[in-house]
Image (cartoon, rainbow, N blue to C red):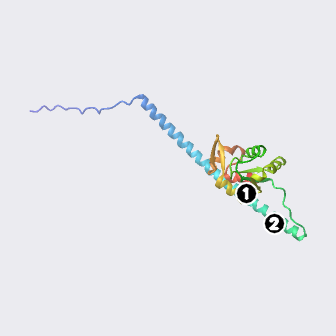
């Protein structure tokens, strides 16, 4: 007769995982959790920042509307009184270079360098002071300048605005770029930047 001995099934074959690999897995899981938490916090901060930016933009629109109404009222009052309305002295100029480098004397050339007008069609916003007004007289043949309105400032910043961040010329295409560099000055968005330049 056949031998009826019971054979026990062989124990499952187990591979021991090296301890370094276990530590590595544990660290990667912990870093993934921390990264997810940071991403969540960043998203919450971004959402709250969007609300602040939107409220500020609404406030700026109201402020600009009130300024325009005040100017219109002043013009009407002057007309009723038989006078002329003369707007105040400009506080901001937009200066653009219109002539090249040939046959420019040294003094105007240096002033153009100070104003960062190194090439034709370069433009800068400049606060009007007595010193800048005197310098503008020296370089008048090489530039065109005037007081920009809000629409012009907004279009120039959105279309051609660049900022210098870590010695690199970076386009102002996102609020994050502005906030990262000017957040400490409470300028969080491009609209804040436009408001600061215009006012």
Residue 86 visible to the viewer: yes
Residue nearest the viewer, comparing 88 with 68: 88
Q: In the visual, does 103 lie left or right of 75? A: left
* Number of marks in the rendered image: 2
Rendered view: 105 above or below 77 = above
Label 1, residues with CA under 10 Å away: few <14, some 14-19, many ≥20: some
SS label for mark 1: helix
- Residue pointed to by mark 1: 60
Q: Which mark is residue 72?
A: 2
Q: Residue at x 84, y 56 (%)?
A: 89
Q: Nearer the viewer, mark 2 or mark 1?
A: 2
**Comes first in the chain, label 2 or label 1:** 1
Tell me where residue 101 appears, x and y as whole percent: 70, 48
Residue occupying the far front of the picture: 103
Q: CA distance from mark 2 to mark 1?
A: 19 Å
Residue nearest the viewer, comparing 39 with 188: 188
Is mark 2 in CB contact (under 8 Å) with mark 1? no
Label 2, residues with CA under 10 Å away: few <14, some 14-19, many ≥20: few
Tell me where residue 110 appears, x and y as whole percent: 76, 43
Residue occupying the far left of the picture: 1
SS label for mark 2: helix
Q: Which mark is residue 87?
A: none
Q: Based on the displayed image, in which of its 4 quarters is residue 8 positioned?
A: top left
Residue 52 visible to the viewer: no
Q: Residue at x 38, y 31 (%)?
A: 17
User: If the image is split into quadrants, where does the N terminus sit?
Assistant: top left
Tell me where residue 120 appears, x and y as whole percent: 68, 51
Tell me where residue 64 appears, x and y as whole percent: 75, 60
């Amino acid at each position: 007769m056949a031998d009826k001995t019971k054979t026990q099934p062989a124990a499952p074959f187990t591979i021991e995982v090296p301890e370094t690999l276990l530590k590595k897995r544990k660290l990667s899981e912990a870093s993934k959790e921390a990264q997810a938490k940071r991403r969540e916090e960043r998203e919450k901060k971004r959402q709250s920042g969007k609300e602040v930016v939107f409220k500020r933009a609404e406030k700026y629109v109201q402020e600009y509307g009130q300024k325009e109404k005040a100017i219109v009222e002043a013009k009407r009052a002057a007309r009723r009184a038989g006078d002329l309305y003369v707007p105040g002295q400009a506080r901001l100029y937009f200066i653009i270079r219109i002539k090249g480098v040939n046959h420019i004397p040294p003094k105007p050339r240096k002033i153009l360098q100070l104003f960062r007008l190194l090439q034709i069609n370069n433009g800068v916003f400049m606060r009007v002071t007595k010193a800048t007004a005197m310098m503008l007289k020296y370089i008048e043949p090489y530039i065109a300048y005037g007081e920009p309105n809000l629409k012009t400032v907004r279009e120039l910043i959105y279309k051609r605005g660049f900022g210098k961040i870590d010695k690199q010329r970076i386009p102002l295409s996102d609020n994050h770029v502005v906030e990262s560099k000017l957040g400490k000055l409470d300028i969080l968005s491009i609209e804040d930047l436009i408001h600061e330049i215009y006012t």
